[in-house]
Image (cartoon, helix red, strand yellow):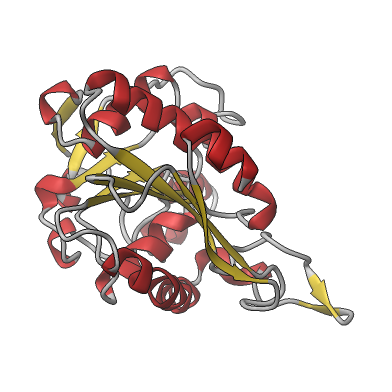
Amino acid sequence: LDQAAATAGKSYLLVYDPDFPAPQGALAIGVGDLETASHVLLMAGGVGTGPDTVPGDITDATAILAAANAKDPGDLSAAIVYAGYDAPFGGPLTVNGIVHEEVPAILNLGYATAQGAIMRDQLSPILNSLPARTNVTAVLHSFGTTVGAAAVKAGLPVDQIVYTGSPGVGFTEAGQVPINPAFQFVVANVNDPVVQLDEILQGALSGLGAVLPLMVTVKVPDVLGPNPALRKFGAQLIDQQGGLPLFQAHQTPAYLTEEGVENVAAILIEQYDDVEIVGEN
């Protein structure tokens, strides 16, 4: 709270529950003046997200708010940093000596959908209490894109979505999400192993086909849905740095580069002409 107030002038404790969802609990911090903001940034991360990651997320949020303010000093923007669903590996791996159910959850659409319902329940009262004119942009990362899309599908009141490093959002096309595809944006590094998971697995099976010919006919299912950066999904693809090595390309800093922050800030304040769209891919 002190960090958010020091960097954005005002802070709010929006969600706090040390026990639910187990084992990590829930936390959401408001950054800036939510009561007067015309644009609100909602940030949610993926695997490894939990209350302990909130300080770093506040730093990222304030960088985006600063970029938005530089673009339009008259615009009032604030942020909500959310770590309230039970993210895989976001808390202890064992509870009372028993391996927790979140360990196999990364490729479990049902798990993501259930966590999306938690996200909706925790955040909808907060978002519905914002001034009627407020435009809300959800910036979701990795497994958080799957959970966040499920939350929006279940009724979370969001106006725009930015998917970064998505393994799939649980839907086959943008039109299945109750937000106009024109306001769904995707950033996908070409070397990001999470984004390319389906292609990597399919390539491995194709290689096995040289030894086991029947394997080449096997198709790896898109467990969490197709890569939303693909043309068939129908969202707006943002140009992104593609030269990062494999082990760096999925990390949040790989997406919130200086260019990435500028693009997100422009989307946040609805200055779409400043966003580097490379097509409906």
Residue drawn where x is 15% and y is 47% of the image: 183
The residue lying at 25 percent from left, 66 percent from top is 157
The answer to whether residue 182 is seen in the rendering is: yes
Q: Residue 197, relative to residue 117: is it above or below?
A: above
- Nearer the observer, 213 or 173: 173
Locate residue 114 relative to residue 275 in the image: left or right: right
Residue 121 lies left or right of residue 26; in this view the side is: left
Image quadrant where residue 117 sits? bottom left
- Residue 128 is situated, as x and y percent measured from the top left of the image, at 27, 69
Task: Specify the quadrant of the image occupied by residue 242.
Answer: top left
**Residue 23: which quarter of the image?**
bottom right
Q: Residue at x 39, y 31 (%)?
A: 64
Q: Residue at x 62, y 39 (%)?
A: 3
Query: From the image, which quarter does the C terminus lie in?
Result: top left
Is residue 177 or residue 56 the one in the foreground? Answer: 56
Of residues 222 and 206, the one nearer the viewer is 222
* Residue 222 visible at all: no
Drawn side of residue 1 relative to residue 173, left or right:
right
Residue 6 % position (x, y): 57, 34
Q: Is residue 169 left or right of residue 141?
A: left
Q: Nearer the viewer, residue 208 or 223?
A: 223
Q: Give residue 95's position: percent from left, percent from top.
A: 81, 78
Give coordinates of residue 42: x percent, y percent: 38, 51
Q: Determine the residue located farthest toward the right in the rendered image.
A: 97
How many numbered discs sit on the rendered protein?
0
